[in-house]
Image (spheres, rainbow, N blue to C red):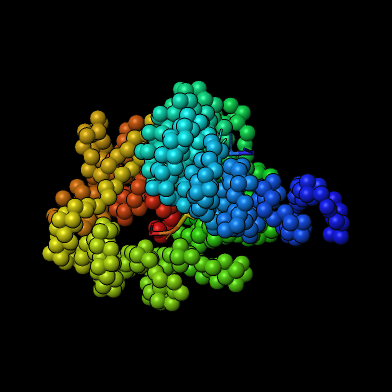
Amino acid sequence: MHFSPSKIVVNKRAAEQQCLSLLQTCTTLLNLNQIHAQILKLGLHDNPLVLTKFTSTSSDLNAIDYASFILFAPDAKTHLYDTFLYNTVIRAYAQTNQSRITAVDVYKTMAWNDVMPNKFTYPFVLKACAGVGRLRLGESFHGSVVKFGFENDIHVLNTMVHMYCCCGAIENARVVFDEMPKWDSVSWSAMIGGYARIGMSTSAVELFRDMQIARVKPDEITMVSVLSACSDLGALELGKWVENYIEREKIPKSMELCNALIDMFAKCGDVDKALRLFRSLDGKTIVSWTSVIVGMAMHGRGLEAASLFEKMKDDGVAPDDVTFIGLLSACSHSGLVDEGRRYFDSMTQEFHITPKIEHYGCMVDLFSRAGHVKEALEFVKKMPIEPNPIIWRTLTAACRLHGELNLGESITKQLIENEPLHESNYVLLSNIYGKMSHWEKKNTIREVMGEKGMRKIPGSTMIELDNKIYEFVAGDRTHDLYKEIHEMIDEMGRKIKMAGYVPTTSEVLLDIGQEDKEDALNRHSEKLAIAFALLKTPPGTPIRIVKNLRVCGDCHSATKFISKIYSREILVRDRNRFHHFKDGVCSCKDFW
DNA sequence: ATAGGGTTAG
């Protein structure tokens, strides 16, 4: 529509119509600014219809701020403004990243002006609370929802579940969910997604099964959350089942769903399948590229990650900060120190991305792992942002590994002073004393930990067999097959010792005798799970296990021998990465 | 006019 500023509109209603139809065709911000000028010229700045349309047309924060400025003005014609207008402004704020919480201010102004909220108001304000994690505020809206009688509205309740999930109150979310009068696929997705986001992946999968029992058909969004739970668990069989389910139920494969599949296959150990899926994608988004780069990083295929990164640039896709975390961690896992340094520099110079603390963390990790402890320390000293405890912990772990024990001790002591309730600081110091053979000091640490009621996170290993997930915890004696498993561990020990395995008893940081140390090593959950798999699966079947911590040196060495003696491929996912054991060697080339 | 999803260092 052509717009002529010289045209004089005398009739107010006609002017209003003109503005509305102009806004209807508005496509660009520039266009919007011109229309805004015209709105002012026609004296329609506080016209409710125009204001509503103006707000809903633009996602620009300035435009929204302008609308709320009019609403908040001391001489505002409050009697003209209805719930619809307020809802529009609240929604606009709730959708922005920067000013989400302002939605709540608009809500308050609305209450102040005695404009009644309706059932559409609450999803917006609850979403704003979810976005900024404000539980108390969310709870007060929960109260208002009940007060105004919207507690049976499925849309309001779905957002309420989402809000509680996002505010760290998963139990409250579950109570609201359980008490809903009925559930649609959105309700289930909100709850399943809530579990998946905070890592309660088993609950997410269980709830998905309940959803099937309830015969609610999941959509592609539900499936993204379920796949995310599979990724977290490392449950390949389950993930494959989900993939089949998607095909069978003809659930539309959105880009996000394809990305979730890629992520699942990479994190469940079949990175080549992830790569094939990735290649078959028509439009690849930044997330597709990042997922496959992170996948390569986890499998120690640093050079392939780097070449994917180059291909991504050639494709004209600009990397973001997450891509760089994947790329830098790929360099770190593969010992590509020079490449990592170069990519880190290119971040600012070529792509104008300001490195965050995570990127500095990757670099410290890169230098530390490669044994460049001094360079790591220099790097930390020169960081433009305050190093966080994670960075210091990375550094001290490297100190222990590369014999810089005094440096490690002093940093860790500082850490304990700063974060006296963080158990991993004590574990680090205790490990350093163990390596120094300062048993008395080490015992003191353990006593202090005991007094404060802290203890080491127990190691656990998960294995999927016949559609069931088994979890082994270090030293667990309660398993049904306890006796058989330990006989198997003894047998494994005898066989691999004959092949040259020497127990790495120096890894055991306890002041006990040699035999007890070997015994302690044999109770590691990883060995329990491998013994269980050898007992329960036919010869030659590959073994896949998932650990909650990083693989220890002794288990790593033992698993190499086991893969050779028992002719099994063993795929171990630890906290950071994958280890592919085959014929006595590991894909990480003993660098992890 | 209303609700729900993915990628992140140690």
Residue name at image x 36 percent, y 49 percent: A560
In which quarter of the view is residue A386 placed? bottom left
Residue name at image x 54 percent, y 43 percent: A115
Rendered location of residue A295, percent (x, y) = 51, 50
Residue name at image x 38 percent, y 66 percent: A388
Q: Is residue A470 visible?
A: yes
A463 to A52, vertically: above or below: above
Rendered location of residue A135, percent (x, y) = 40, 47
Q: Could you tell me which quadrant the C terminus of chain A lies in?
A: bottom left
Residue name at image x 44 percent, y 39 percent: A144
A562 to A431, vertically: above or below: above
Query: Would you say A307 lies left or right of A481 here?
Result: right
Q: Is residue A256 visible?
A: no
Between A360 and A264, which is closer to the camera in this rendering? A360
A345 to A62, vertically: above or below: below
Rendered location of residue A301, percent (x, y) = 51, 55
Between A140 and A292, which is closer to the camera in this rendering? A140
